[in-house]
Amino acid sequence: MTKEDILRLRDTAEQTRVQFKERVTRDNKYDVSCEMVAQSNSRGGMIVVGIDDKTGRINPLSFVEAQETTNLLGSLASGGVVPQILLDIENVQMESGVIVVVTIKQGRNKTYRDSKGIVWVKQGADKRKVFDNAELIAMLMENGQMHPDSMPVNGTSIKDLDENTMRDYLLNRFRSDFERQQLSITELRHRGLGEIAGILSQTPEGILKNNGLIMEDGTLTVAALMLMGKYPQRWLPAFTVRCVSFVGNSIGGMEFRDKSGNDADGNAVHLYNYIISFLTRNLRKKQVEKDFNSQGELEVSTASLSEIVTNGILHRSYVIEAPLRVFIFDNRIEIHSPGLLPEGVSMESIKHGASVPRNKLLFNHGINLLPYTGAGSGITRALKFTPDIKFENDETLNEFIVTIERRNAGATDVKNDRDNDRDKRDREDRDKTLGSNALKNSQGLKRDREDRDDVIETQHVSYKSLSGVQKNVIQFCNIPRSAREILEHIGYAYNSTNIANQIKPLLEIGFLEMTEPEKPNSKNQKYRKVRKEQTEAYDIR
């Protein structure tokens, strides 16, 4: 560091990673040690001794003062910070003495405390005490001493896992074992969980315990609940997804093309499908072949979107109680994932395939349910298809933000505008429907029957022609749901009339299917979304 560097630091004033002290003495040594603690617990920084923090006046140290200061700083690093830290001290020659520059690295053994046992972190140019357990856990997590996805969720058991998702997990996880026994994966999908696990000489619960997804007492971990839960948000209400498509380019905009009234919930598979469906229906398609009837290509690579969404779900912080947010603007897409990049990972390193999983259980087992390789190459692959992706560690919001520029942002499509207007009316209708108890009276049921008659005139029904309530039901059934769960979700009483009016029409026109079609009246009957709706029936533009 040179004299010119010192002058530039002085001119930019104190900031998060730069603190000035005119002198370090025995009177202010505790305050200096607290600053060391705060920088170690945050992103590191510098303490510059020889500059007045109030006026910015440079007051260099004499030879003797510099010697005493470096000795005192070393003593504080070993005795005033617990556990002790290492300092990099540099003396910069000025005209009338030296400036002592102390560099403190981000700690690898968090949480650091002062001699009184108090934890400090940086807050802007100042520092603050930490008392919140969630924040302490986040520090331990950054250091790899704690993985929140392995924490138990009290009150849960294997009964809270979705059977179909568990079946998919087992068949994918042990595919090679079944193939060695020359067993058909397709045929196994029709067998019970106990029978599938029996082929491996285990029980479903035993397999999940052996893989760290269930605790020894049968309690589910956060990872198990998020990957395979029937309804994880019953216990983990904040871990949802919020998707908004704005008109314009400001997050403060009040006009929307697509905005859900509630956050999307469900397990990781459901959340992934919900986000991809939202992106697919709100992004433009462009014609890439001369044939007029050829299928258009999405304006942003689907492969890139899949990688970014999967990363957001698996690598988000499960300590910070906030939803994963997906925003579409006229000129860009933003995906806000709670939590900064983990310790040891930088924006540059992830572009080259660096992988330090924050949530090891989710990362290791999500590969059996979500589309990724587990080799740390997701971001690299996304950049291959879409080079203009930007990454940002936003320390103010405590979020990792991925921004994808939209191609041909200025283009307009009259048909899309008409479709958006109709979607807006559908959403308004849904919001009114969900918010009104009148749905349960006879007049509401009559209107529902009339809507049903309109819908089932043809078996080739466009998704966009469905009502807001029907679309809500379809998205809710990304993971199988019982009739009671569906009706309660949309605000209806559970009875045969409402089943006939709200669920059966979607079965008849092919948007839902039964999990047990051979036993339509089974007490275990559930309904799930038919995957073809995203292409043929959805008629997305």
Image (tube, rainbow, N blue to C red):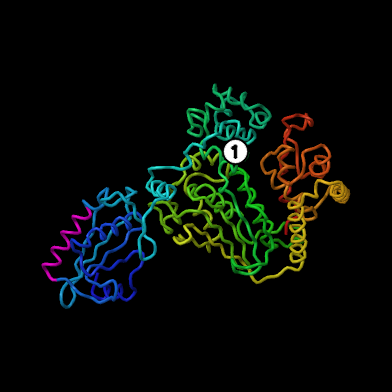
Asked whether the viewer can see residue 134, the reply is yes
Q: Which residue is mark 1?
A: 229
Q: Residue at x 54, y 21 (%)?
A: 201
Q: Residue at x 78, y 29 (%)?
A: 519
Q: Please give the range of residues in magenta.
A: 62-77
Q: Secondary structure at mark 1?
A: loop
Q: Looking at the rendering, which quadrant does residue 62 occupy? A: bottom left
Residue 171 horizontal side relative to residue 453, left or right: left
Taking depth in this image into account, of 245 and 509 the one nearest to the observer is: 245
Against 515, residue 121 (above or below) is below
Report the magenta stretch's main SS. Answer: helix
Q: Is residue 376 left or right of residue 454?
A: left
The kind of residue on which mark 1 rests is: Gly
What is the quadrant of the C terminus in the image?
bottom right
* Crowd tier of the residue under label 1, counting other residues whose Cα lies within 10 Å: few below 14, some 14–19, many 20 or above: many
Q: Is residue 319 left or right of residue 196?
A: left
- Could one spot residue 42 in this view of the protein? no
Q: Estimate the x, y position of residue 81 in percent, counting from the top left.
A: 26, 52
Q: How many marks?
A: 1
Let me know if residue 143 is in the magenta part. Answer: no
Determine the residue located farthest toward the left in the rendered image: 64
Residue 101, percent across and down?
23, 66
- Is 481 placed left or right of 467 in the picture? left
Magenta stretch holds residue 74: yes
Please tell me which residue lies in front, 145 or 446: 446
Specify the quadrant that holds the N terminus.
bottom left
Q: Residue 369 falls in which quadrant of the image?
A: top right
